Image (cartoon, grey):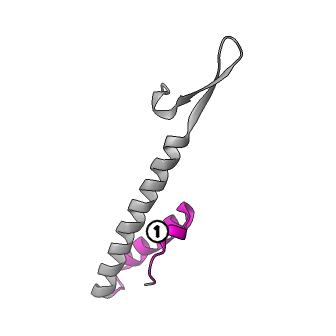
Amino acid sequence: MENLDLENLSFEDALIKLESIVRELESGRIKLDDAVSAYEKAVALKKFCEQKLKAAELKIEKLEIGKNGELSTTPLDKIEE
């Protein structure tokens, strides 16, 4: 397995790598030492993806038009379901 360069990795690329590792581990055709290394990389990729998603979530806001016609935003966590 190659070393991970998370700093220059997009969310999509990280997810693809994570899915690939999971498929490889599920296949059962990987040596124990390689499986441990792959698992450690999968954990790092999962954490990276979660951080990217959280950062994106914090940036998402709902645009609203007020009674006076002015635009305002509401943070995602304040939007009613």
Look at 45% across and 59% down and name the residue there.
Answer: 49
Q: Residues within 10 Å of mark 1 (few under 14, many from 20)?
A: some
Look at 56% across and 39% down and name the residue there.
Answer: 60
What secondary structure do most residues of the magenta stretch adopt?
helix
On the image, the x and y values in percent for residue 19 come to 46, 68
Secondary structure state at the residue bearing disc 1: helix
Q: Quadrant of the N terminus?
A: bottom left
Q: What is the three-letter code of the residue carrying label 1?
A: Glu
Look at 43% across and 61% down and name the residue there.
Answer: 48
Is residue 8 shown left or right of residue 22? right
Query: Which span of residues is magenta-colored?
Result: 2-30
The residue sitting at the top extreme is: 67
Q: Which residue is mark 1?
A: 19
On the image, the x and y values in percent for residue 74 come to 54, 27
Is 75 within the magenta? Answer: no
On the image, the x and y values in percent for residue 11 come to 53, 61
Look at 29% across and 86% down and name the residue there.
Answer: 33
Picture layout, residue 73 above or below residue 38 = above
Is 24 within the magenta? Answer: yes
Is residue 12 shown left or right of residue 2? right
Count the marks.
1
Picture layout, residue 61 above or below residue 39 = above
Picture layout, residue 56 above or below residue 62 = below
On the image, the x and y values in percent for residue 45 come to 42, 66
